[in-house]
Amino acid sequence: MPGIQTRPNEAWPLSAMAWMPAPGGECKPARPLLLCTFRGRAPVPSFPCTRGPQPMIGIIGNPQSGKSSLLNLLMAGSGARKGKRDHEAVVAVPDPRLDWLSAKYKPKKHTPTQLEFTDPGAEPKNAGADLTALLALSDLRNCEGLALVLDHFSAGVDVEGVMDFELATVVADLDLVSRRLEKLVADRTRGLKEAEAEMVIMTRLQEHLETEAPLRTMGLSLEDQGRLRGYQFLTLKPVMVVSNTQEESAGSAPPAELVAACERAGHELCALSAPLEAEIAALEEAERTEFMAELGIEEPALDRFIRSAFSSLGLISFFTAGEDECRAWTVRDGASAPEAAGRIHTDLQRGFIRAELIAFADLEKHGDEKAAKAAGVYRLEGKDYVVRDGDVMEIRFSV
Ligand SMILES: Nc1nc2c(ncn2[C@@H]2O[C@H](COP(=O)(O)OP(=O)(O)OP(=O)(O)O)[C@@H](O)[C@H]2O)c(=O)[nH]1
Ligand SMILES: [Mg+2]
């Protein structure tokens, strides 16, 4: 794709803020998303997910690229279940750290964090839809991230699929911006003054997209991206490229050109062979380890895929651990300790006093809390603490 351009982020005119749609669909207020509902209490709004209690990733790709194979594979993983619809799968994010905690505390309940995947191309009404048609579906637009499946099993690996996808998403966003601008021009003609401010911003987005560059290269601040959330621009979404390779390629590194193309585009890359992964998933644990050793792989590519899909969304996990439950909780990277506490219960956020915590690596190193405390690696953190991936926390609160 020619000339990806970036330019510094100019301040948004203050007057422009008023029109910004709330998350959750063009110009519609977001349905607040709820992670836990405690009887009779206000639900906890999550990091904004637009579709359900856990982040949703939309599976996209050309016809016959292996989208359904990937969804079936996800469904076959341990802890996976069918989502609300047949083409949706809720999967557990594999995390050896949580497994370690559960092995230690032997809790009554082991609760990994979850991600949801949807394959709208599998809906009968979308049968045979190509990439462009799939990208137009609101089901995909409303996802927090996209997984692009590329057929690299029938004709080998190339980088065309990544380039075609980039262009298709830029064109789709440009179409959205252009339609919005048409409406704004009509509004201005009718004398609506507010239209002016939004036009300034939409024109900037349009100019950028016309250079065939995705909006993620525009240098928009996180705050500005948040303001634009309601539009669900495809080129602002994190993308996981799934190179669905030939079985023989399992265990070898993806070709350098593909790695470079994904890096240029800012996408995560995961190479896997769908039929091989299905074979691995169907084996008993002992046989699985042996089979993977023969192939020269340490863990199923599927596990790596789910984990990097999770982190590509800008999410991290913290843990609570005890004899009742060992649980991984999802927060956005950058969340404060009270925000993280609020994921567990609104009361914990409201009455937050402090967090008592230890980094998972320190707990693992010292073996247990007592030894960790003796080594001085157990910490007390206040309201301003920014939670780190892998923190094992206990919240002190008073309401
Ligand atoms: N050899 C081989 N065949 C595969 C692989 N992945 C998928 N296939 C085959 O390719 C065909 C299409 O796979 P699907 O998973 O149905 O592809 P899809 O993208 O869901 O297809 P549509 O929904 O029709 O667009 C099926 O016959 C699969 O068995 C692979 O890694 N290797
Ligand atoms: Mg399919």
Image (cartoon, rainbow, N blue to C red):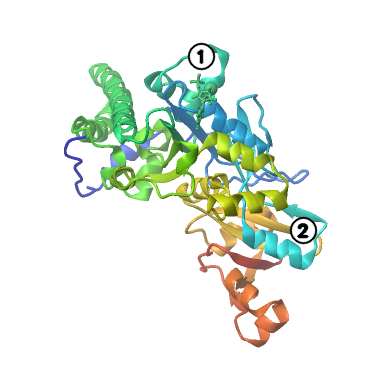
- Which residue is more in the foreground, 143 or 361? 361
Question: For the C terminus, which image quadrant?
Answer: bottom right
Q: Furthest-top residue in view?
A: 125
Q: Position of residue 192 (x, y in %)?
A: 29, 23
For mark 2, what is the residue? 325
Give the class, few, some or many, for how many residues have Cα within 10 Å of label 2's Cα (few <14, many ≥20): some
State the residue at coordinates (56%, 38%).
276
Q: Which of the two marks, 2 or 1, is nearer to us in this view?
A: 1
Name the residue located 20 percent from the left edge and 30 percent from the top edge.
210
The residue beneath circle 1 is 127
Q: In front: 208, or 63?
A: 63
Vertical placement of residue 219 versus 341, above or below: above
Task: State which quarter of the image contains the N terminus.
Answer: top left
Asked if marks 2 and 1 touch (Cβ < 8 Å), the reply is: no
The residue positioned 62% from the left and 77% from the top of the image is 365
Q: At 42% across and 37% down in the image, what residue appears? A: 229
Q: Amino acid at mark 1?
A: Ala
Instruction: State left or right for residue 217 relative to residue 341.
Output: left
- Residue 394 against residue 291 in the figure, above or below: below
Q: Answer left or right for 157 relative to 316.
A: left
